[in-house]
Amino acid sequence: MPRLSEVIAALENLWPAERAESWDAVGTVVGDPEQEVTRVLFAVDPVQEIVEEAVKLGAGLLVTHHPLYLRGTTTVAASTFKGRVVHTLIKNDIALHVAHTNADTADPGVSDALAGALDLRVVRPLVPDPSDPEGRRGLGRVCELDHPLTVREFAARAAERLPATAQGIRAAGDPEALVRTVAVSGGSGDSLFDHVRAAGVDAFLTADLRHHPASEFIADRAHGAHAPLALLDAAHWATEWPWCELAATQLDEISDRRGWGLRVHVSRTVTDPWTAHAASNTTSSSMGAPN
């Protein structure tokens, strides 16, 4: 069985730390390089619920997409929820490794996995990595559908194919407009609107769309500016979870080639923070006249 340092080296080859954004916090958070690893668990969030799952599984390594300490810290006291995560990991000899923005721009990466979950054909990165001469790496993906769908139908496909969350899929735009090309970006994506416009796609599916950027984006089209027919807003966790399956498959293949015999698992625990959704009354488009 491999040592942790060997497994981490393989992960760093897939998602080099130097390709992460300067503000990001990727790499190994806790773990003894010399410890042996037999099981690995992939998840989106390094929260206590996931750590407890790793303990029950007997995993020696937990790989998450989101960092534990993105902003840094001055304490790992177990009285804080992040400190409790660290204490639980160390007490149970579980290492934690993070692949965040370096996995977002990888080839294949987070948005490739999202496109695959939606049965889309990837054409190119939405925001190419200028350091990649082949033009395959980068943020987001521009994709094609196998056949045109209405915005309503494509939203239904996303709701069916992505992990279920309380939010589901929100859509902005004409529900009956036809969609042939789509830009996707796992995680928060409204900072990419200029790139989406330039891509000339019919729709953009991402997460965490805020009111003002989305409203202005749709208004651009109403006033003649080029913009996609629709915006589709999914839960942040749901757009990134498919990467866990992709990453697990990649590590499985490495383990097979090297004869490591690793048992690689993907957490199906929903760590999206929202737990309920109450639909509004849609029988009227107005709030009604005041009394």
Image (spheres, grey):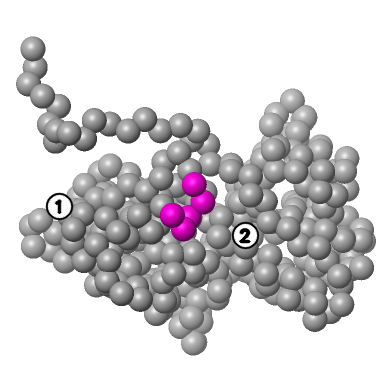
Q: Main secondary structure of the magenta part?
A: loop
Classify 78 as above or below 219.
above
How many other residues sit within 10 Å of disc 1, few (<14), some (14-19) or many (≥20)? few
> Where residue 150 sits in the image (x, y, percent)?
24, 62
Q: Is 91 inside the magenta-drawn segment?
A: no
Classify 161 as above or below 49.
below
Residue 218 seen in the figure:
yes
Classify 40 as above or below 84.
below
Q: Within the image, what quadrant is residue 36 found in?
A: bottom right
CB within 8 Å, label 2 to label 1: no
Label 1: element kind = helix
Q: Within the image, what quadrant is residue 196 found in?
A: bottom left
Residue position marked by numbered label 1 in the rendering: 219
Amino acid on which disc 1 is placed: Ala
Which one is earlier in the sequence, the residue at label 2 or at label 1? Answer: 1
Q: Quadrant of the N terminus?
A: bottom right
Q: Is 163 inside the magenta-drawn segment?
A: yes
Q: Is residue 96 left or right of residue 188?
A: right
How many other residues sit within 10 Å of disc 2, few (<14), some (14-19) or many (≥20)? many
What whole-number distance in Å separates the C-alpha atoms at marks 2 and 1? 36 Å
Classify 70 as above or below 242.
above
Q: Within the image, what quadrant is residue 227 found in?
A: bottom left
> Where residue 245 sits in the image (x, y, percent)?
62, 63
The residue at 69%/31% (across/down) is: 81
> Where residue 198 sits in the image (x, y, percent)?
26, 71
Please state which of residues 136 and 241 is positioned toward the viewer in this rendering. Answer: 241
> Where residue 291 sits in the image (x, y, percent)?
8, 12
Residue 198 seen in the figure:
no
Residue position marked by numbered label 2 in the rendering: 244
Front: mark 2 or 1? 2
State which region is magenta: 160-164
Please state which of residues 77 and 114 is positioned toward the viewer in this rendering. Answer: 114
